Amino acid sequence: MTSVRRYLISVLIAVLVLTSFLAALQSYRLSAERARELFDQDLQLIAGAIWQQYDVNMPQPAQGLAVQLSRHGELKYRSELAPQAVNSWAQGYSEQNFAGKRWRVFVQSGNNGWQIMVAQPLQQRLQLADELITASIYPVVLSLPVQALLIWLIVSRALSPLRSLSAQLASRKANELSPVTLEQVPEELKQVLQSTNQLFERLSATFAREKRFASDVAHELRTPLSVLEINLHNALTRWQQQGLSDHDETMLALQQGVERMRQLIEQIMLLNRTHPDNFQAKTRLLDWVALCRQVVSEWFSQLEQKQHSISIEGDEHLMVKADDFALRLLVSNLLGNAIKYTPAGGQIRLTLHTSRDKAVLAIEDSGPGIPPQEYPQVFNRFYRVGGDRHQFAVPGAGLGLAIVKDIVSLHNGSIYLAPAGFASGLKVTVELPL
């Protein structure tokens, strides 16, 4: 197939010509058969008229015809439906009423005073006309569904390369940017296919550069940041050995700034790693309850330091098919946020259960919570509630929930925010397919 247009035009013309010829042939056959029946009836009338001249007992005319023969006004023969008396109707064709019907009458006079009258019911003539018309258009009407089916098959065949291209594009993953190939490429799709593959090539190069940039920057920053942390630690140690005091807390501010930068770099690397376009998930069956207990134990020192009361409620075991690293990171980020924003002596509650075909994790805290109007924005990268008004009191970069959102999307799940069941606070609910 070199061109969809030429293929469609040539094949559709051929199909229409073939079906129209077959329909006309069938119409001719049916019309000829009906005309033969009418000519046969005329032969019966002619034979009857000849028999009457020789006083032969003529059979009744077929198809309800009325025949009357007279000479000098004297009735010589009449069929069953003909009038009993000779009428003085005009010569030629006319329409008359007798025997309770409307008739088409033909009267003709011959030599020696002979006169013949032949009549046919108008209803019968209309029925014969309808039959002839039906016989002529019936094959054409019958061929229309056949033509429609053939046209549908032909158009489907012609558009198969377009459907193949659409199916390939729809089935591709977000990070699959290899060139698209088709077995048969019509002329109309060559430019489209070439432009699409060129776009994929440019996107692949752009994504590769972006991925390398984020990864390289994060890795390159780790080394000077580690050096900076070591030097700060050594400087603070010397200050303490020399008996110097940090009255304005300059060293403390530096340590906090370096720690915040280190956390930001780690989160950027995690965000790049867990993005659905880059993450290669290795899913397996995991016990979400056991995983939550492990994450809580990892955060135990922070929980103990702030004297938080934490509980895990719900099902004893909850099996989900997920990536171990991603799911552990999801729970750790949500629990870390709850610990970070919950004041000392506050409460944190983890609830795990099933709901229909979903595995559900809900984490509630008794912190300040988030205004409902800001729920949609907190999943954006680097977004923090109220801007940076609490950046020093509560360190962070606004990437935690963005990472959680990517992990949830990676597992085809859903995440919701709502007020907590405590006097204040936030409730984060994560639903993953069982």
Image (tube, rainbow, N blue to C red):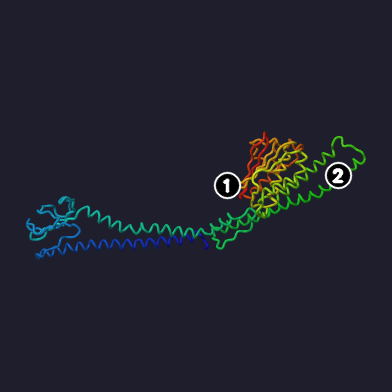
Q: Quadrant of residue 179?
A: bottom right
**Residue at 39% in and 57% down:** 144
The spot of residue 178 in percent (x, y) is: 64, 58
Q: Up-down: is 353 above or below 10?
A: above
Tag 2 residue:
233
Tag 1 residue:
356
Q: Please identify the residue farthest to the right as the structure is shown.
A: 242
Any part of residue 187 in sight: yes
Q: Quadrant of residue 306?
A: top right
The residue mark sitting in front, 1 or 2, is 1
Q: Is residue 232 left or right of residue 367?
A: right
The spot of residue 294 in percent (x, y) is: 72, 48
Closer to the camera in the image, 195 or 180: 180
Q: Up-down: is 311 above or below 153?
A: above
Looking at the picture, which amino acid does disc 2 mark? His
Q: Residues within 10 Å of mark 2 (few under 14, many from 20)?
A: some
Spatial CA distance of label 1 from label 2 is 53 Å
Q: Please identify the residue farthest to the front as the structure is shown.
A: 316
The spot of residue 299 in percent (x, y) is: 75, 44
SS state under label 1: loop
Q: Residue 273, which numbered label?
A: none
**Sequence-wise, which precedes: disc 1 or disc 2?**
2
Q: Is residue 20 left or right of residue 84?
A: right
